[in-house]
Image: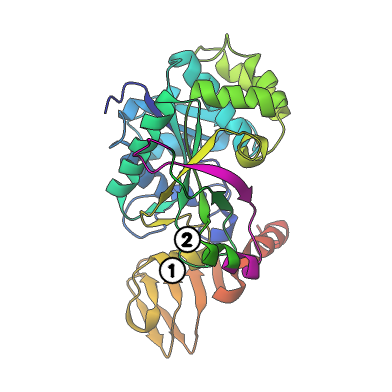
Amino acid sequence: MNTSNIYVAIMAGGVGSRFWPASRAARPKQFLDILGVGKSLLQLTFERFEKLCPAGHIYIVTNQQYAGLVKEQLPGISDNQILAEPSRNNTAPCIAYTAFRLQALNPEANMVVAPSDHIILHEEAFLDTLRAGLAFTAQHDALLTLGIQPTRPDTGYGYIKYDKSPLQGDTGGLHKVLSFTEKPPLEKAREYLSSGDYLWNAGIFAWRVESVLKAFREYAGDIYRILAAGQEHYNSPSEQAFIGQAYPTTPSISVDYAIMEKAPNVYTIPSSFGWSDLGTWASLHAESTPGSHGNVLQGDKVKLYDTYNCLVRAPQGKLLVIGGLDDFIIVDEGDALLIWPKSREQEIKRVTGEIEEGFL
């Protein structure tokens, strides 16, 4: 496959508050070795996409406060490959900014957009799926979103309803998207699973810059107008000054709300490649290979007694002795310790906000 027009934008600007206390505002989860493999999630994501296109075609879109961290973790990339956002305005402005930048660089650019903090267990299947999608978007005015075959009635993911009849004449497994649904209650998630008509929304996209900018122009005019005003600045020394002024004035909205739920030319490929968005400690536990009694351990001096189905993360060299717990998250970061029931982990984000106000 000719990769000269293929580009990747890795979104790496989030704060990862559900992974507190490991993830902090100054060093969020995408920059951490959450999996205990010696590399950060961002580094793993970058290496994955090096198999899809040249390293020089991979761009990191992040908050300007993390530009130094990106450079530290990916020392081989140029400053031009880091798009520094001056404000957090959700995914729609982030994607539009990247598309304008790539359009100025290569009007034929065919781009993938992906978060920096997802797990992909079967990388070759993932890359093959993207190649099929990129072959389609290269030839069609199409917005592609990867859909994951659901394995459980999960209430933490958005869902995609799709036409189960494949596109006529297509061999890449593409289907028309009928609608998007936000995170459903459990009963509704069970209905979606049993119907077979729904996929999880992975938040991984592919499209030509021409197609996505056309969609922004038609369905998210404010974002398009504000960022299109800087076309003379993209890929020039004046770009950051323009973005510093214009970007914070864009509406804060997700790309799903801004264009994907409105556009008629949205397609998906039902996929299975061992995906998790790794949004919470419990999802890390679920995606890890447990040891005895269902426990997942990160740390070299952890002693467990009568303890089951727990995730334990401890600093190297620190002794943790834990007894009598079932289905808990225990995360010791030295200056902060979290002990929390896995069944209530959705509360961690709220509690973290309260703690930051009172203690941090």
Magenta range is 168-190
Determine whether 140 is above or below 326 in the image: above
Q: Which residue is mark 2?
A: 150
Q: Amino acid at mark 2?
A: Pro
Q: Which residue is mark 1?
A: 286
| Spot occupied by residue 126 in the image (x, y as percentages of width and height) | 34, 46
Q: Amino acid at mark 1?
A: Ala
Quadrant holding the N terminus: top left
* Viewer-closest of 165 and 31: 165
In the image, is 309 to the left or to the right of 56?
A: right
Quadrant holding the C terminus: bottom right
| Spot occupied by residue 8 in the image (x, y as percentages of width and height) | 41, 32
Quadrant of res 300: bottom left
Residue in the image at 38% along x and 40% along y: 73
Question: Is 274 part of what is drawn in magenta?
Answer: no
In terms of secondary structure, where does tag 2 sit? loop
